[in-house]
Image (cartoon, rainbow, N blue to C red):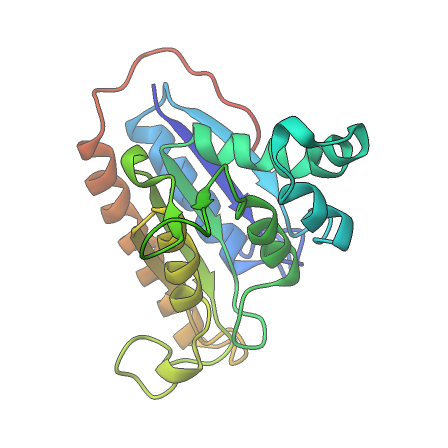
Amino acid sequence: MATILHLDASARPGRSGARPHGSHSRRLSAHFIAQWRRVRPGDRIVYRDVGQQPPRPVTGDWIHAAFTKPEAREPWMHEVLAESDALVDELLEAELIVAGVPMYNFGVPAGFKAWIDNIVRVGRTFGFDRSRPGQPYWPMLTEMHKRLVVLGARGDHGYEPGQRLAQANHVEPHLRTVFGYLGIEELHGIAAEYDEFADARLQASLAQAEQRIEALVDSLAAELDPPRDVVTATGD
């Protein structure tokens, strides 16, 4: 049985197609999970909505606690890191991370950035030793062979590599850098565009994104062990 970590980051609470002004990224991530359950009904789904319930941002106390060796931490430090520890635990347990991440002002939403800042943890997801020869930093998740799927929505169009606004896309490139730093190097990105135009091009883009999601689900699911029959799902 595999564990899937399903994240949503949109500020919009509903899904497009089911609610007026609903989120396209939530729609796409929900479509991915529905298709995944179709082919692997026994897998465990862990859901976290960082758009509606964003993690607390990193503070000076958080940094102090995180960079203090675990055996030397005071009780207040464990309290400050408790939410981050829970988020890291979820990440470590998941073979596949599926994230609905809309583009906000060319980058990721604040809630998703707060989640990233909480899971990039020295000693847990990356290593650091200033006395280490060569590179003092190293990824700690490489041997876990995790995969990341980013399902997005963009107001304009042309953000794919080689297109007119590719240089302004700081979503997928940013996430490739961050998760590659931790050792998660396989990233699949699918996004709908034309949201601000709200015309037939948006509907066509959504339909194409959903078709690509279905193909991606079949491909990724085929790479995992045969599914079990028992459903143990939380969330969604």
Q: Is residue 160 left or right of residue 113?
A: left
* Residue situated in front as seen by the camera: 83 or 228: 83
Quadrant of image for the C terminus = top right
Residue lying at the far bottom in this picture: please name it. 164
User: Looking at the picture, how far across and down is residue 15, in whole percent?
Assistant: 57, 52
* Relative vertical location of residue 38 with respect to residue 130 in this rendering, above or below: above
User: Looking at the picture, how far across and down is residue 165, in whole percent?
Assistant: 39, 85
Residue lying at the far top in this picture: please name it. 230
* Relative vertical location of residue 168 with respect to residue 31 in this rendering, above or below: below
Q: Residue at x 38, y 68 (%)?
A: 173
User: Looking at the picture, how far across and down is residue 189, in whole percent?
Assistant: 34, 59
Residue 7 visible? The answer is: yes
Q: Is residue 194 left or right of residue 185?
A: right
User: Looking at the picture, how far across and down is residue 207, in whole percent?
Assistant: 35, 60
Q: Is residue 118 left or right of residue 220?
A: right
Q: Residue at x 35, y 37 (%)?
A: 35
For the image shown, how many numbered marks are present on the structure? 0
Instruction: Choose top left, top right, bottom left or bottom right for residue 66.
Output: top right
* Relative vertical location of residue 58 with respect to residue 74 in this rendering, above or below: below
